[in-house]
């Protein structure tokens, strides 16, 4: 079994993102499952950046607590991260630093010198380091060179070639100096079939999921960590055909534009983070009242206010649940990894169309910014269903009424301009025709109509995914904690605790069997990334289950299995 | 020309008797009829106020959304289906205060949206508070000592933003107004018509007589293509107030700049779904 973690650390500007992207892609092509997270353990001053690449022969979805290999691009990184290594860990660093460390395997490489000699200048030290790491792990250098070619192709041949020369120089140096001494040769271990695997960020998965679900319109205002979704779709809009991305002047405009496009009959969405979502709250309520199918992707980051713009948290769950004034139906999906993100978007668009109400897909920085390796994405799994949308109208049914009462609370919806009928959508309380009303009777009927949709939404809610390892305790989580919680359950087995991991990819409405499922467990412990236990409160208010404990993390850092296990043990 | 009666809606009207919104309603019907636009071919996006109720009293498609948010909704409608005529409608509070940011950016964007602002220099629906176009010293329930804020000149702002069609009408002359609205609808880019509208209930200063004494129609000596001259006319406010087309330019509408829309409206492009191997290949 392979489970290795490589951390790449250095000063901002030394290309940690690039080096980890190269390693992640090159190792995915070697047939490994990779999970790559950025800024992990970056706990010191502004300029210091860290990314972690974890590889395994089976799917991984969380960073490891300790690293096997450290690529230190500057002196600070050596001191800062030597303590984050496993015993006998491998440290690759520039040989201009003279280091002593009994606990680690030291591999000094003239990173900057080789970069200057073989690449363009010493900034290509990151490519040299990639070459050295590939040699230490006993892989061939050619696939690495191919990966560099693909990643830098947009920058032109001279840049590609210089990077490849730098990487080959690092590889050659390590081959001569260190052949066979690195303990992390994984060459003969089992792995997946490389051609099956895909490597993408969660944001790319959200965007790709929207695309294959037929999104036609996205309006948004840039805000980390949601911007990457907008940028992916913006870059593809001409190539895929029939997709339009508009940068709005603010989030209020963004949500209202998406509503306009959805009313016209296009599948439409917006994306933002907590602060922008706060500005969208009135628009969300508008979509609820006017019965507009709207999809909002909310990528959480730690708040309040500007918070930690580049870090992770799950602190907006109850905000997503209650955002918008008044009472209306909504669903909240919370995918746990890149594969679930694609499915979540497909489901979100279908639910929005079928129930003509807003659907929120709740992600976070950890989901969105990490690279994930997945088996081929089979987006065809969720066929497109546009519900009661029609572009014809049978006049024998009388005049069309936008808010015609119906048993399921959902009225026929017509594409404006296609049928000869006219339609009135109204944000005031309205009659079936869509005109402003003050009638108490109509008000009661319309409130019931809109809220009736919750019945249908609940009936088809996703059931929680149970990773069954016994019934001493159920470790319950939602969204991006999925893999860390699973791993923690596996790790607890080694300590004699039979823990199951229960992952919710839908936070609202909860699947009707949730109470039955968790009620059987002796002990429920909720794991979530916020300070106040929001999912635990939701679980209690929706099902009556009162969790025995909560494992919380709210320092902006991603969850790891080790963190969960330690906290579990501390719970006693 | 269609019969203006085909735009008659059954909805009960909730304006004050004698309101000049009735004249604007007549002008809108006449403009649509003149342009042969059938009720189902036009979609209104309106906000909240007395003004934005207007499309309820028309037989036409309507999205009556939030206070101040008419323009983003209109933009979304137009970009998703540019075959529709899209008309945004609201008051001076709706468009110039709550929606002020959208107003500026809609003009920059230049999507083919017609924007009709019923400018009564007061908040009507909420029973008489100051508005961005209220004159200095204007006394209302919320400004009992008179408004301290310099009034906004929406047309000057529009010329500054290079809005591609800028006009002012007067609800006291529905015939002339209908002509302006028709020209605005026929204009390919974003078109603003600011409509001076006496409020018979809450604005006792800017009355029909007040406007009537000041308003004059721009003549052939004004060249709407001359931006500097347009700016002068847009700033003219006081003893004399010009109505007519103040500024036009030939900036291409946003829709014409988007190759995605060359084949037809977004909504008519097939939603096929399913895996996209070409896109997945980049993740390998
Ligand atoms: C977000 C929000 N803020 C405030 C209001 C209350 N409100 C409704 S209409 C209006 C102003 C109406 O004035 P105007 O836009 O000039 O339209 P008029 O009634 O004069 O035609 C206000 C303040 C609201 N509906 N929504
Ligand atoms: Mg007003």
Image (cartoon, coloured by chain):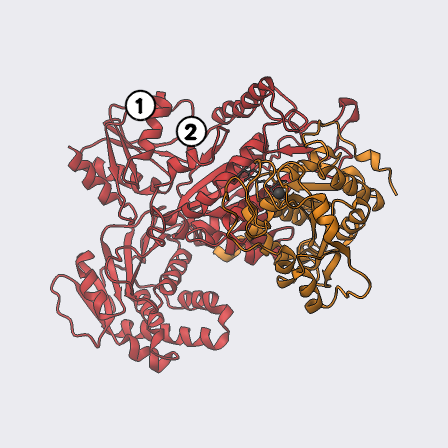
In the rendered image of this protein, which colour is used for chain B? orange
Q: Is mark 2 within 8 Å of ligand 1?
A: no
> Which secondary structure, mark 1?
loop
Question: Residue A73 lies in what quarter of the image?
Answer: bottom left
Count of numbered circles in the view: 2
Name the residue at 38% across, 78% down. Answer: A119
Question: Residue A488 lies in what quarter of the image?
Answer: top left
Mark 1 or 2, nearer chain start? 2
Residue A215 makes an appearance in the image: no
Q: Nearer the viewer, residue A378 or A125?
A: A125
Q: Is mark 1 within 8 Å of ligand 1?
A: no
In the rendered image of this protein, which colour is used for chain A? red
- Left or right, A113 with respect to A226, comes to left
> Which secondary structure, mark 2?
loop
Q: Is residue A122 above or below residue A570?
A: below
Which of discs 1 and 2 lies nearer the camera? The answer is 1
Labelled disc at residue B97: none
Question: Residue B236 lies in what quarter of the image?
Answer: bottom right
- Left or right, B272 with respect to A301, comes to right
* Disc 2: host chain: A
Q: Nearer the viewer, residue A76 or A414?
A: A414
Q: Residue furthest top?
A: A441
Name the residue at 28% across, 49% down. Answer: A557
Find disc 2 in the rendering and name its residue. Answer: A463
Q: Quadrant of the C terminus of chain A?
A: top left
Q: Residue furthest left?
A: A102
Residue A128 x %, y %: 33, 72
Residue A468 x %, y %: 31, 31
- Left or right, A444 with respect to B272, comes to left
Find disc 1 in the rendering and name its residue. Answer: A545
């Amino acid at each position: 079994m392979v489970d290795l973690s490589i951390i790449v650390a250095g000063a901002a500007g030394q290309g940690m993102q690039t080096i980890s992207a190269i390693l992640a892609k090159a190792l995915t092509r070697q047939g490994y499952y990779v999970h790559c997270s950025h800024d992990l353990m970056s706990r010191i001053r502004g300029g210091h950046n860290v990314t972690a690449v974890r590889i395994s022969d089976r799917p991984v979805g969380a960073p490891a607590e300790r690293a096997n290999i450290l690529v230190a691009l500057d002196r600070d990184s050596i001191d800062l991260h030597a303590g984050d290594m496993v015993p006998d860990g491998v440290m690759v660093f520039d040989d201009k630093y003279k280091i002593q460390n009994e606990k680690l395997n030291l591999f000094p490489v003239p990173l900057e010198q080789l970069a200057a000699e073989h690449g363009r200048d010493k900034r290509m030290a990151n490519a040299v380091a990639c070459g050295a790491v590939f040699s230490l792990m006993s892989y061939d250098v050619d696939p690495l060179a191919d990966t560099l070619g693909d990643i830098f192709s947009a920058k032109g041949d001279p840049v590609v070639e210089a990077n490849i020369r730098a990487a080959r120089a690092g590889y050659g140096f390590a081959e001569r100096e260190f052949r066979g001494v690195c303990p992390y040769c994984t060459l003969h271990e089992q792995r997946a079939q490389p051609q099956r695997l895909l490597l993408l960020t969660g944001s790319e998965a959200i965007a790709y999921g929207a695309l294959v679900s037929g999104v036609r319109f996205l309006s948004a205002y840039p805000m980390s960590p949601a911007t990457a979704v907008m940028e992916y779709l913006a870059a593809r809009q001409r190539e895929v055909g029939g997709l339009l991305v508009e940068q709005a002047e603010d989030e209020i405009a963004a949500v209202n534009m998406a509503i306009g496009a959805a009313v016209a009959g296009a599948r439409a969405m917006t994306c933002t983070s907590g602060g922008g979502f706060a500005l969208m709250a009135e628009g969300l309520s508008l979509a609820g009242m006017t019965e507009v199918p709207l999809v909002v992707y909310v990528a959480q980051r730690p708040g309040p206010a500007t918070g930690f713009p580049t870090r992770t948290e799950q602190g907006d769950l109850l905000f997503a649940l209650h955002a918008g004034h008044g009472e209306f139906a909504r669903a909240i999906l919370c995918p746990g990894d890149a594969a679930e993100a694609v499915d979540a978007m497909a489901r979100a668009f279908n639910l929005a169309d079928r129930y003509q109400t807003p659907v929120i897909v709740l992600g976070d920085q950890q989901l969105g910014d990490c690279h994930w390796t997945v088996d081929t994405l089979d987006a065809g799994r969720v066929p497109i269903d546009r519900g009661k949308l029609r572009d014809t109208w049978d006049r024998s049914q009388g005049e069309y009424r936008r808010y015609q009462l119906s048993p399921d609370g959902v009225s026929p919806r017509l594409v404006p301009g296609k049928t000869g009928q006219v339609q009135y959508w109204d944000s005031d309380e309205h009659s079936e025709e869509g005109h402003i009303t003050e009638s108490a009777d109509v008000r009661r009927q319309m409130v019931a109509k809109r809220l009736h949709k919750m019945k249908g939404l609940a009936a088809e809610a996703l059931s929680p995914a149970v990773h069954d390892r016994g019934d001493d305790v159920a470790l319950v989580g939602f969204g991006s904690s999925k893999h860390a919680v699973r791993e923690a359950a596996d790790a607890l087995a080694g300590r004699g605790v039979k823990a199951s991991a229960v992952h919710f990819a839908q936070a609202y409405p909860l699947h009707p069997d949730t109470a039955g499922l968790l009620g059987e467990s002796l002990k429920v412990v909720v794991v979530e990334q916020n300070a106040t236990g929001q999912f635990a409160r939701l679980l209690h208010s929706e099902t009556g289950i009162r969790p025995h404990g909560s494992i919380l993390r709210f320092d902006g850092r991603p969850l790891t299995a080790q963190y969960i296990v330690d906290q579990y043990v501390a719970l006693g | 020309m269609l019969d203006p009666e085909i735009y008659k809606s059954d909805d009960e009207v909730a304006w004050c008797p004698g309101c000049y919104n009735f004249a604007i309603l007549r002008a809108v019907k006449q403009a649509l009829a003149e342009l042969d636009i059938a009720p189902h071919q036009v979609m209104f996006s309106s906000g909240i106020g007395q003004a934005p109720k207007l499309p309820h009293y028309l037989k036409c498609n309507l999205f009556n959304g939030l206070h101040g948010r008419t323009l983003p909704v209109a933009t979304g409608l137009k970009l998703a289906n540019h075959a529709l005529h899209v008309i945004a409608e609201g008051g001076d509070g709706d468009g110039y205060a709550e929606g002020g940011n959208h107003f500026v950016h809609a003009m920059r964007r230049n999507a083919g949206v017609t924007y009709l602002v019923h400018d009564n220099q007061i908040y009507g629906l909420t029973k008489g508070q100051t508005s961005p176009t209220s004159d200095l010293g204007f006394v209302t329930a919320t400004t009992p000592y008179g408004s301290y804020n310099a009034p906004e000149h929406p047309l000057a702002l529009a010329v500054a933003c290079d809005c591609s069609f800028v006009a002012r009408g007067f609800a006291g002359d529905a015939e002339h107004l209908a002509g302006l609205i028709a020209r605005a609808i026929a204009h390919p880019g974003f078109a603003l018509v600011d409509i001076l509208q006496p409020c018979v209930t809450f604005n006792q200063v800017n009355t029909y007589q007040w406007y009537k004494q000041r308003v004059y129609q721009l003549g052939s000596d004004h060249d709407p293509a001359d931006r500097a001259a347009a700016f002068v006319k847009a700033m003219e406010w006081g003893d004399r107030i010009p109505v007519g087309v103040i500024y036009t330019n030939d900036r291409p509408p946003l829709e014409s700049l988007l190759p995605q829309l060359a084949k037809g409206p977004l909504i008519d492009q097939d939603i096929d779904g399913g895996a996209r191997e070409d896109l997945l290949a980049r993740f390998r």
